[in-house]
Amino acid sequence: MTTQQAPAIQVQGLEKSYKEVRVLRGVDFTVARGSIFALLGSNGAGKTTAVKILSTLLKADAGTARVNGFDVAAQAADVRESISLTGQFAAVDEILSGRENLVLVARLRHLKNPGKIADDLLERFSLTDAGARKVSTYSGGMRRRLDIAMSLIGNPPVVFLDEPTTGLDPQARIEVWQAVRELAAQGTTVLLTTQYLDEAEQLADRIAILHEGRIIVNGTLAELKQLLPPAKVEYVEKQPTLEDVFLSLVGADGGKDGDAGKHASRYASKEQR
């Protein structure tokens, strides 16, 4: 099987312990190319440890893992050229402008036309108007979008997003969700770790639940829902949630936030019907 034919990520029997604590206890999963795969679990479940192993930052005690067709242990350099990792906190320089951050990374990667690369990514992530501003003036959602944009310089085929919306407000979360959807739509494979159920439900083509170091279930959202008894049909009055109200009011202005507010309004109206 060639690199392009193989799954983007293949994990088999992955194990990792820290002294007496077994963090991963034989983890298996496969991620198809161009898909969004969510690794869902509570804090301490082993999500970040798995990502660190797949991104060659940590060595597994046992098992095998391949990313973009390359073995993470034996072909670490090839794996690093194939991936980008966005950690739990935005790794941006607040002193520089958004455009300067992007240009810096492009130059570090020795790419041609770093200015054009920066401008294209600013437009892609709806940051053109803020491109000349210092990142210290950015909102949480803007910083996260810039962080993801920086990770895409060089067009890596596989992107790891480790809890990308932790600490963000509802509007910023929706902005990041849209950015992740656009990545997959353009053919990038995304492995997303999250502890938020709604995030996995909104974004993922497949969801694996990691619990106490093991994958206890892996499938599409529809397949996971089939694990529960069939739902009973009941007619009840559905009241809008606080999130629906918040997004409807605060997201009423133009731009991305406006789109988020309109979407929330439509969602709330649909649910009430």
Image: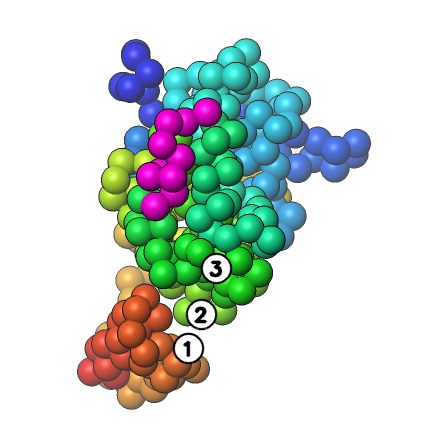
The quarter of the picture where residue 87 lies is: top right
Residue situated in front as seen by the camera: 160 or 95: 95
**Mark 1 = which residue?**
243
The x, y position of residue 224, in whole percent, is 35, 50
The x, y position of residue 235, in whole percent, is 24, 83
**Mark 2 = which residue?**
170
**Mark 3 = which residue?**
133
Quadrant where the image shows the C terminus: bottom left
Tell me the kind of residue under disc 1.
Answer: Glu
Tell me the kind of residue under disc 3.
Answer: Arg
Left/right of residue 171 with respect to residue 25 in the rendered view: left
Q: Residue at x 27, y 19 (%)?
A: 5
Label 2 – label 1 distance at C-alpha: 7 Å
The x, y position of residue 188, in whole percent, is 32, 36
Give the secondary structure at mark 2: helix
The x, y position of residue 97, in whole percent, is 50, 53
Give the secondary structure at mark 3: loop
- Mark toward the viewer: 2 or 3: 3
Magenta stretch bounds: 110-119
Closer to the N terminus: mark 2 or mark 3? 3
Q: Residue at x 54, y 36 (%)?
A: 51
Disc 2, disc 1: CB below 8 Å? Answer: yes
Residue 103, label in figure:
none
Q: Does the magenta stretch mainly form a helix, a strand or a loop?
A: helix
